[in-house]
Image: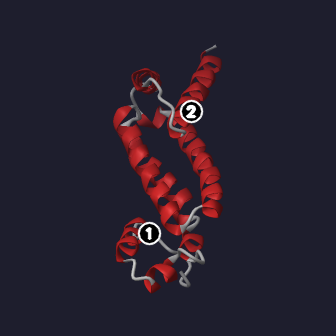
Amino acid sequence: VYQEIYFKARDAVISLINQEREGEQIDRALLKNVLDIFVEIGLGKMDYYDFEAYMLKRTAAYYSRKAKSWISEDSCTGYMLKAEECLKQEKDRVSHYLHSSSEPKLLEKVQNELVSVYARKVLEKDHSGCRPLLRDDKVDDLSWMYGLFCKINFQDDAV
């Protein structure tokens, strides 16, 4: 019985988080209470906090879909703005209802899906990537780009 209820509650929590990611207002206090119960059921030990692994997996899938759409629709600057805003919002989620130990793992997932995976495509965008920003002396945008990309490990020397 517990597993059935847990899975329904877990899916409902992910649904609420995604609604908030889409800009809808949600009851953060309710969400925090449910997540606190998940931790308590896990005997207060984070290694039993199995919601986190599921949430991280669903977060990666959510941002993978978003990034795929944004990379084709937005300019380099527009994409970076959205990526940076998402990172800020996820940090805010941790402070309001997620467990604090989830923050580095959550931010790493979002950073990976929005920045690492699409780094080359963002930097090489024809009319708004790194070359046009250099050519047009867009120092502020280049500085902002550096701030976003300096946190990732480029595995491709060509980048």
Q: Amino acid at mark 1?
A: Phe
Query: Where is residue 80 drawn, in percent x and y?
Result: 48, 62
The residue lying at 51 percent from left, 32 percent from top is 24
Q: Secondary structure at mark 1?
A: helix
- Closer to the camera in the image, 46 or 53: 53
Query: Where is residue 151 drawn, in percent x and y?
Result: 40, 66
Say which residue label 1 marks: 149
Query: Where is residue 103 drawn, in percent x and y?
Result: 39, 45
**Disc on res. 131:** none
Q: Is residue 17 above or below residue 60?
A: above
Q: Is residue 113 above or below residue 132?
A: above
Query: Where is residue 130 drawn, in percent x and y?
Result: 49, 78
Residue found farthest to the top: 1
Q: How is the image coloured?
A: secondary structure
The residue lying at 61 percent from left, 51 percent from top is 66
Between the residue at mark 2 and the residue at mark 1, the CA separation in whole angstroms equals 28 Å
Q: Secondary structure at mark 2?
A: helix
Say which residue label 2 marks: 14
